[in-house]
Image (cartoon, rainbow, N blue to C red):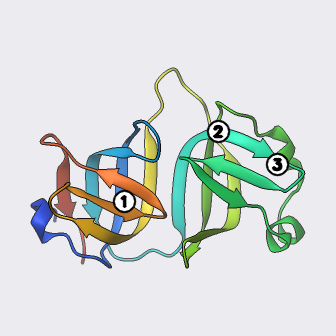
Amino acid sequence: MSEFLKFDQLQNGNYVRIIGKKKGKACFLAVEIVVEDNVGDALIESLVQKVDLAKPELTIMDLPINIGEHYQQVNQKDVMNTLEPGKMVKIKGTFKDSLFQLHQVKPIDTLLFNVEKLRGTISDIDMDASSFVVNGVNVVLNSKTVIKDETG
């Protein structure tokens, strides 16, 4: 059963699922935040900003994400060739030491209005700014942001 929380009840280390919209450079406005039990991989679901197959690198939510050798060896290389700026993508991986280590890339339907998502661990809570960081993305809240606890 869900319980509603206030911002000051969030803590660094909470595992969260966030629905919202990217606003400006390196800023994600949260509409809904759900504190949940850790389910594993970090997730970012957003519009591709840049694809650089020469590096190889993908930019999503202003984060450059290296497409490492491990990803290329265990996954289909053809997926990377279908990605282009302005298209929605879901990436899963591990966020550690300020780097997103890619495990999976999946193109998803791009609509006229796209809901973007983050899933990962909270760090760098700023009570004064009503913000925190998840997967290297600065998440901001406003008076309409809903926070729920679904841990269990």
* Rendering quarter of residue 34: bottom left
Q: Of tags 2 and 3, which is closer to the observer?
A: 2
Q: Are marks 2 and 3 in contact (CB under 8 Å)?
A: no
Which residue is tagged 3?
80
Which residue is tagged 2?
49
Which residue is tagged 1?
17
| Residue 149 location (% of width, % of height) | 19, 66
Q: CA distance from mark 2 to mark 3?
A: 14 Å
Residue at image coords 78%, 62%: 67
- Left or right: 47 as drawn, with respect to 57: left
For badge 1, the amino acid type reads Arg
* Rendering quarter of residue 121: bottom left
Q: Residue furthest top?
A: 112
Q: Is residue 58 above or below residue 93?
A: above
- Left or right: 67 as drawn, with respect to 149: right
Q: Disc 1 or 3, which lies upstream in sequence?
A: 1
Q: Residues within 10 Å of mark 2 (few under 14, many from 20)?
A: some
- Left or right: 53 as drawn, with respect to 140: right
Q: CA distance from mark 1 to mark 2?
A: 22 Å
Q: CA distance from mark 1 to mark 3?
A: 25 Å
Q: Is residue 46 above or below residue 105?
A: above
Query: Can the viewer see residue 3?
Result: no
Q: Residues within 10 Å of mark 1 (few under 14, many from 20)?
A: many
* Secondary element at tag 2: strand
Q: Of tags 1 and 2, which is closer to the observer?
A: 2
